[in-house]
Image: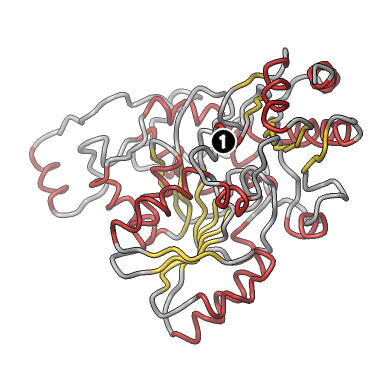
Amino acid sequence: MKKSKFSSLSLSTKSIHGKHPHAFKGPVTFPIYQTSTYRFENSNDAIRYAHGDSNVLVYTRYHNPTVNEVEDRIALMEDGEAAALFSSGMAAISTTILSLCKSGNEIVSTPALYGGTYRFFRDTLPNYDITVKYVDPNSLEDLMYLITPKTKLVYLETPTNPTLSLIDIEKLVKLTRKMEKEFRKKITIVIDNTFATILNQKPFDFGVDVIVESSTKYLGGHADLMGGVVIGMKKFIGQVKELAKHLGGCADPFAAFLLDRSLKTFELRIQRQNENAFALAKALEKHPKVSRVIYPSLPSHPHHKLAKKQMSGFGGMVTIEVKGGVKGAVKVCDSLKVAVNAMSLGGVETLVSIPVYSSHVKMSKDELAKHGVTPGMIRISVGVEGIKDLIEDFEQALRKL
């Protein structure tokens, strides 16, 4: 298992205020610049901005000190040169994709994706004449045939939502770089690292170019903010931010302030969620009314060895299949008293959802099969509650089946 290089020092005590061009050095907590526009000292500021001086604050859709501070913090903690915050995870993903692709380009993606991403690929990108091909994660060698001179990016998500299957990042990067050399063109590799988080998986160490995450989830961690983030090289993030000005998915200053608060407890929360998820997974694997438990650290997981190779922790997500199909899943979710029946994930509260009614709604049987989603599946986002309370809660709910 890889040792994590992550340190809470980069979040709570290693301040970057002194490097920030608009830093306010007074309060311990960085303030909220809750404003849509900014006062010029005189018209020279407007002239400087017109001539390209990015240090001149003009309009919050373009830049905001609170947002910029959090972008710098996330870039630091994820070992990236720069980051861009967005109003949602999908705003981050869609802006990243559209900053890379134009009409006639192709994307090669792994098939098991967050439902919102998959529907964006399926329903929206064809309108822009952007084609998406899918590679079987168990046959990554097929990248040699799927990647063509039209391929602009390779997209992956690992662990996947909600099946927690894993993609061999190192192998995918190696094969993509080989095709990059053959066609003598840059192919950008983008990973959705939301489920793992940087504490459990460091994609840049494997040669990935761009990380996208829904900061609504583990980065935010309290079910009280919406956001997304893109991390990568400074030049690329600059391109993303320019397009974001036109698409308008800019981050809200107050959401950025809440995210800044959350980053201070990020490591503590993730470590507890890792521990609770493993304990809950082990307990449920023994339960007679649970058909299957999916969690990367369990030896029963089909990609257990790969998980130990490329992850330093195994995350807070556990997926189970219960007997009785979707009716059984509904019965269990409705009988829980500690865990909350709600969509989304990554917060301090344990949440449960039924993928066929939430993340993977409005998909055909063939699409669900391709994603590995079954009717009796329950996705559990494990929180930080007492583990005995959680286990007892699921046991009492399963008795209702």
Q: Residue furthest top?
A: 337
Q: Is residue 288 left or right of residue 352?
A: right
User: Which quadrant of the figure has residue 166?
Assistant: bottom right
Residue drawn at point x = 33 percent, y = 26 percent: 33
Q: Amino acid at mark 1?
A: Leu
Q: Position of residue 248 (x, y in %)?
A: 27, 41
In the drawing, does residue 373 fall left or right of residue 154?
right
Side of 334 where 183 appears, left or right:
left
Q: Residue at x 54, y 80 (%)?
A: 145
Which corner quadrant holds the C terminus? Answer: top right
x and y, in percent, of residue 201 in the image: 67, 51
**Res 55 quadrant in image:** top left
In the rendered image, the vertical position of residue 314 relative to residue 218, given as above or below? below
Out of 325 and 43, give the one closest to the viewer.
325
Q: Position of residue 184 (x, y in %)?
A: 43, 85
Residue in front for this viewpoint, 170 or 32: 170
Q: Is residue 1 above or below residue 228?
A: below
344 is higher (above) or lower (below) than 85: above
How far across and down, in percent of the image, does residue 205 sit? 64, 62
Q: Which residue is mark 1?
A: 219
